[in-house]
Amino acid sequence: MANDLWRTPPEVFQYFNKDYNFICDVAASNENHLCTNYLTEKDNGLTSAWNYSVYASEYVWCNPPYSQPLPWVKKIIYESKTNGIGTVLLLNHDMTTKWASLLLSINCHIIVITGSRISFLNEFGVPTNGNSKGQVVFIIPPYVDTNRKPTTEYVNLSIIMADKNEKESL
């Protein structure tokens, strides 16, 4: 799918990176990676070890191909439970899917992005207009507890997009 290659706007990434200080972008390309350490399609983040973590309890960024998020969700839960790697995961807001059911069964934090849809960037770094769904962010902590339910909050996209500018003006 064409939108599998859409890039995360830097403001969205920075909004979360300021709190989680990502050690790796696990679903990236040479052209669109957002971290110094990153895994490309060739590296195959679904089968390779996410061994960028020097210490447990660090976080990676994941904006996976939206055509097949279920394998990514399974890998993220595995890495959390087994290796203590947390993930901030950006996906379409669709709670009717198998991947959403998995995430709704663990102790993660859900941020529903409201107010507008993210204008992802195309291969030239230009915002796209073809985003037909809203987005949601799942924050899966290191060593996730599978016996507790998630928490949810709502954040307007304008706050996420303005956050970088507010910090620069301080």
Image: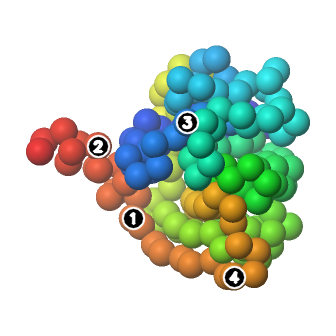
Question: Secondary structure under badge 1?
Answer: strand
Residue at the bottom extreme?
148
Give how far apart the Cα atoms at labels 1 and 2 are. Answer: 14 Å
Disc assigned to residue 64: none
Locate residue 115 relative to residue 35 in the image: left or right.
left
Measured along the vertical axis of the image, is residue 3 above or below residue 98? above
- The residue where tag 3 is placed is 23
The image quadrant that residue 97 belongs to is bottom right
Question: Secondary structure under badge 3?
Answer: loop
Disc assigned to residue 156: 1
Question: Secondary structure under badge 4?
Answer: loop
Dot in front, 3 or 1: 3
- The residue where tag 4 is placed is 148
Residue 20 screen position, x and y as percent: 47, 49
Residue 35 screen position, x and y as percent: 53, 29
Camera sees residue 76: no
Whether pointer 3 and pointer 1 mark residues with C-beta atoms closer than 8 Å, the reply is no
Locate residue 154 relative to residue 47 in the image: left or right.
left
Give how far apart the Cα atoms at labels 3 and 1 are. Answer: 26 Å
Dot in front, 2 or 4: 4
Amino acid type at circle 1 is Asn
